[in-house]
Amino acid sequence: MQDFIDLIHRDLLPNLQVESIHPHNPVVVHQLPKQWQLIGTGNYAAVVSHPAYSHRVVKIYAPGRPGLQEEVEVYRRLGQHPAFSEGLYTESEFLILKRLYGITLYDCVHRGIKIPPQVIEDIDQALNYASSVGLYPHDVHGKNLMMSEGRGLVVDVSDFLKQDPCTAWNDLKRAYYALYRPILCRFPFGFPYQLLDLTRFTYRFYRRVWKQAQWQSISIDHKA
């Protein structure tokens, strides 16, 4: 592990540029040193790997983005669970995590790869486990979930300390059984990213409007 930490300080951190342009959009990686590979980006951080340490990834938070210490606490509570990654080491700028291999459910729909019910059941059980250790599964969507050898994995847990209600997983589960399983998975082709992104944008817009309506209703009830 110490060799990997030394490599991060010597090669990755001085030559990596990560920027958060908009808080509700993924961070942007402007520069990545040779040999390092970009695995993915989220609203807070970028995840990269090095071929010499293929079973680990480094999650580096963009300057000014909060949440690293909260994510450390999430992984502490999760411990070791087959559906989640594992926190291996942390410093003020980054986390080292166990790497999860698979394909996101988002990409499965794009590429026409069928998602079996076992994947949904695995994720459901994993999220129930997270709740049992005092966490609050939040922002669980197709880009944060993966399928590996027919089993379900939860990739991003960075928001699992947020206590405000989130229906994202129940909405996705409902769409799987009502729409994907009986209809969409029968198509012998995938769906373009443009259509998936439009669907995701529409859902997020609807969810924001619905939340605002709820808050307004609560406010009116309190005033009454």
Image (tube, rainbow, N blue to C red):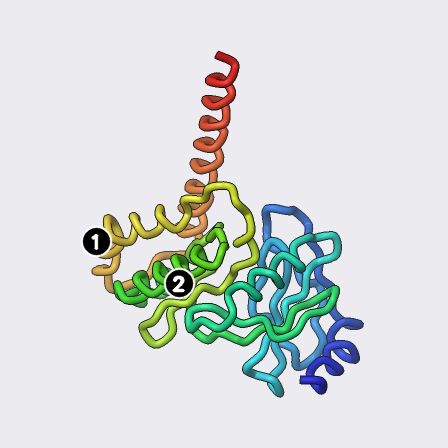
- Please give the residue where the numbered disc 1 appears in the rendered image: 183
Task: Look at the picture and state if 197 lies above or below 36.
Answer: above
SS under mark 1: loop
Residue 14 at x, y = what percent?
A: 80, 72
Q: Residue at x 68, y 52 (%)?
A: 66
Whole-Å distance between the Cαs marked 1 and 2? 26 Å
Q: Residue at x 62, y 87 (%)?
A: 52
Residue 56 at x, y = what percent?
A: 58, 78
Q: Residues within 10 Å of mark 1 (few under 14, many from 20)?
A: few
Q: Residue at x 43, y 54 (%)?
A: 141
Task: Look at the picture and state if 131 lies above or below 222.
Answer: below
- Which quarter of the picture shows residue 42? bottom right
Residue 199 at x, y = what percent?
A: 40, 46
N-terminal of the pair, mark 1 or mark 2, is 2
**Amino acid beneath label 1:** Ile
Question: Residue lying furthest top in this view?
Answer: 224
- Please give the residue where the numbered disc 2 appears in the rendered image: 126
The foreground one among 34 and 26 is 26
| Left or right of residue 185: residue 52 | right
Residue 92 at x, y = what percent?
A: 74, 64
**Of marks 1 and 2, the one in the foreground:** 2
The foreground one among 102 and 224 is 224
Q: Residue at x 73, y 77 (%)?
A: 8
SS under mark 2: helix
- How many marks do you count on the picture? 2
| Left or right of residue 122: residue 159 | right
The foreground one among 122 and 41 is 122
Quarter of the picture containing the N terminus is bottom right
**Amino acid beneath label 2:** Ala
